[in-house]
Image: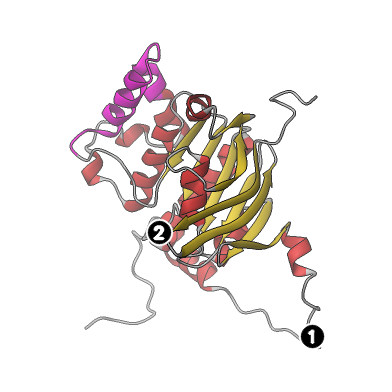
Amino acid sequence: MMTTQQAPAIQVRGLEKSYKELRVLRGVDLTVARGSIFALLGSNGAGKTTAVKILSTLLRADAGTARVNGFDVATQAADVRESISLTGQFAAVDEILTGRENLVLVARLRHLENPGKVADDLLDRFSLTDAGGRKASTYSGGMRRRLDIAMSLVGNPPVIFLDEPTTGLDPQARIEVWQTVKELAARGTTVLLTTQYLDEAEQLADRIAILHEGRIIVDGTLAELKRLLPPAKVEYVEKQPTLEEIFLALVGADGGKAHDRNIGTDA
């Protein structure tokens, strides 16, 4: 018999959910390995958020089973909640408080010892120490999202759900969040990420599942998914820079402070 540490971080079998006549989930199966990044990819309305709500005990499934960190979401909901953190589509920070005060508040709510040290450690980990004394309302979109994820990690939950974490962010902020997610997995945290951005799944995920009309239609590594289509035959390719490379070359190195590159004017 597998121990909790040996079992997958998340295991889902035959998950179903309907709202009256609308069948949102139609028998979803998923297995997420510990310490990995798993991307649940799908368009709006595919059922991604519904699946996350069931896995985080915010919603009950109509049928099927789901275990998170070895615990059944239906019969061991309290144990599941102690094992996870959920970050929704929009940053849930208190803009009246400073970044540090937000973290201290969450640490106190979780009854942790020395909440000030917990806050300072997370500010350092997420490169927010210099901004820790500022109100969160003054943060950029990327900083606010990093603070939101830092708040989710108070207490070191082994599993974190990120529901479309880069929605509404500019390209530079998205890249900041991507780096944060990669660092989470490198430290052993299991990340289930929902997204509708194909490049996000490609950049981050160890495995990708595509959810379409309530069903998983494919589940595998990026290399496995690429093998589903025949490779294109190319005689000659002149590599052009990507928009991301152009963007970072212009603003990434100096945070956009050097604007004296003559690529056009706004006269």
Residue that extends furthest to the left in the rendered view of this protein: 96
Where is 257 relative to 73, above or below? below
Mark 1 to mark 2 CA distance (whole Å): 35 Å
Magenta stretch prevailing secondary structure: helix
Residue 211 x/y as whole percent = 59, 62
Q: Earlier in the sequence, mark 1 or mark 2?
A: 2
Q: Which residues are magenta?
A: 96-120
Query: For the residue marked with disc 1, what is the amino acid?
Result: Val
Where is 178 relative to 262, above or below? above
Q: Can residue 253 be seen here?
A: no
Packing grade of label 1 (10 A; few <14, some 14-19, many >=20) is few
**Residue denoted by label 1:** 234
Residue 203, label in figure: none
Indicate yes or no whether the magenta region holds residue 229.
no
Query: For the residue marked with disc 2, what is the amino acid?
Result: Thr
Q: Quadrant of residue 174?
A: bottom left
Residue, x 55% and y 67% (percent of image)? 213
